[in-house]
Image (cartoon, coloured by chain):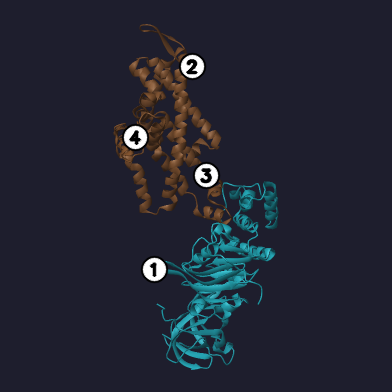
Chain colours: A brown, B cyan
Amino acid sequence: MLGLLLAPALLWLFALIILPHLDLALLSFRERVAPREYVASLAHYRTFFGEPLYWHVFVRTATLSALATALTLLVAFPIAWTIAKLARGRMSALLFVVCLIPFWVSETVRTLGWMILLRESGVLPALLVHLGLTAQPPELLYHDATILVGLVYTSLLFMVVPLVGSLESLDNSLIEAAYDLGGKGWSILRAIVIPHAAPGITAGCIVVFMLTLGNYLTPTLLGGKNSQWFTEQIYTQFITRFNWEQGAAFGFLLLALSTAMVWLGLKISGQRFSDVMRRA
Amino acid sequence: MVATPDLEVRALAKRFATHLAVDDLSFSVARGSFFSILGPSGCGKTTLLRMIAGFIQPDRGDVAIGGRNMARVAPNRRPVNMVFQHLALFPMMSVAQNVAFGLARRGVGRAERLRRAEAMLERVGLAGAGGKRTEELSGGQRQRVAIARSMVLEPTLLLLDEPLGALDLKLREHMKIELKQLQSAFGTTFVYITHDQSEALVLSDHVGVMNHGRFEQLGTPQELYYAPATPFVAGFVGANNRLAGKALAVDGTLVELATRGGWIVRARRQGAIAAGAAVEAFIRPEATMLGRTAAELPAGQTAHAGEVISLLFDGANSAVLLRELQSHVEFRIALPQSGAYADLQAGARICFTFDPQRAICFPAPAAHA
């Protein structure tokens, strides 16, 4: 019975995730020596470690993703706190919808909207000139900061949802008791709220980090050729250079990176994967 | 003038939208005493407690603790600690960390606060439990941790918000005694709120019976029980038979009244009553005496007759529920401890009597529905 209920999902998982990955794994471990002639080899992985550009992009993607995750947490926490603890009934539902609204628009359209707003001849630079803050309209696109803003915006909901869940389950009387015993805002946050919300925080961070690391559209459109996001390298190998073997190797390196970072995150925060996933 | 009371509440009032939660309340609690606020849910007792703790700002009036006015003093700076209804122990911390939490917030060094936490745990009978997690403890032990966590800060006043409410009956009885012993051992002033009259009577030096945001009566448990000041107190504190009717005649301290069914009884007058006025009389189940025939009852007291509805066996608290023959009013009478009358059957006729001095007659409250 259980097998029957899970059959569609298992089929899906097998056909669309496991099979292509097996194929990609095989691809990544072979080298073309002549037309239609391949040998097993680690050459594509060696290329990655031998070429500083790839390394650089890889580390940069990981760092910026981690930064975007941290920023998302900082922005999402007060929102989640408001929804879970301060707002009542309808207000709380309304705030949730406000967080959801951006996702009614396709990511492409949304990001293109940002470009219209931020490009040199766009709305925001024109406003800055109008207010007399700058003489020339500044180029706001193609900066790391712009990429970060875009990524945080895209990820916000995925952080807010698990945070609200874990904060809602926090008994208000614990906060009152801590306050009553002489606690102040920061010490209560550190001693009571964060330890309680830790599974939710970790869950949100894992989801946001994975989404950010694997994001292609936002860094490409907002960062242009300066973005140097690792997914672009994969895209280039597959589509521009027809080097599927190299692309597949990069894909697996990205998978390894995200797995390693999640493992590290769980280790540092002292959380168990099963607890965290229940919150996500 | 005796020592400054540890808690002094003056003309305190709080309104929520249209509902007056606390209505112009004034009282004081002497140092080292156990004070209970007893009332049904929704009477405003929680609001009152939270105003003393500082979680709610009063609309009017003052709270002074240890002689110091607490207006504009935040809860974390008041010399008051609270034991919460569900105790609110911190599940993310060990027992010792729970107890040391307040000390840490005061900047007491790590070694010192662990030493003091351990000493406090020893005082409440939990020596060596410091390393345990809070969920490993029994309900009673958790309560002691909650008290230790507050007492380690040496507050002037400990507020307790129905901490026994969540426990099962047996443990509640046990914890009642333990609370009383802890309070006398510490000598700290306790302010305890509860809707359970038995808790209030057993634990307290003084009890304020609260209803609709006001104190109906403030007194010792004995005063509340034997000399209730209002019909509400008579009905709320302890078991009581309530007879509503009209005063037929008033003779000094005694009122002769008739219930709706025409049953005539006499009771001690409490308050101004004129003949013809609507009244309420209360007679305790244990103030009544049973007899199989009128001849068995003491001479000189009016004998009443009833038909047994059922026997309510509850060990030492056993009672018989009967219907007075004339008016069919239900009446509850405590059974003597001797075990006589244990054989009463439903439908049996029985006689009973009570001393009018031990029955109390109030003017019927005007707003009574």
The residue tagged with tag 2: helix, strand or loop? Answer: helix
Chain bearing mark 3: A
Q: Nearer the viewer, mark 4 or mark 1?
A: 4
Q: Mark 3 points at which residue?
A: A194
Q: Name the residue under label 4.
A: A135
Q: Nearer the viewer, residue B304 or A160?
A: A160
- Tag 1's secondary structure? loop
Judge whether A278 appears above or below B259 on screen: above
> What crowding class fits label 2: few (fewer than 14 Cα within 10 Å), some (14-19), or many (20 or more)?
few
Whether tag 1 and tag 3 are in contact, CB under 8 A, the answer is no
- Give the class, few, some or many, for how many residues have Cα within 10 Å of label 4's Cα (few <14, many ≥20): few
Check the residue under mark 2 and report the chain it is in.
Answer: A
Amino acid carrying mark 3 in the image: Ile
Which sits earlier in the primary sequence, circle 4 or circle 2?
A: 2
Q: Which amino acid does label 2 sit on?
A: Phe
Above or below for A105 versus A224 = below
Measuring from the top left, give residue B279's x and y in whole percent. 45, 85
Picture disc at residue B175: none
In the drawing, what numbered circle is on residue B18? 1
Whether residue B227 is situated above or below residue A219 in the rendered picture = below
* Disc number placed over residue A49 in the picture, else none: 2
Residue furthest to the top: A34
Could you tell whether B252 is left or right of A32 in the image? right
Specify whether disc 4 shares its chain with disc 2. yes
- Specify the quadrant of the image occupied by residue B170: bottom right
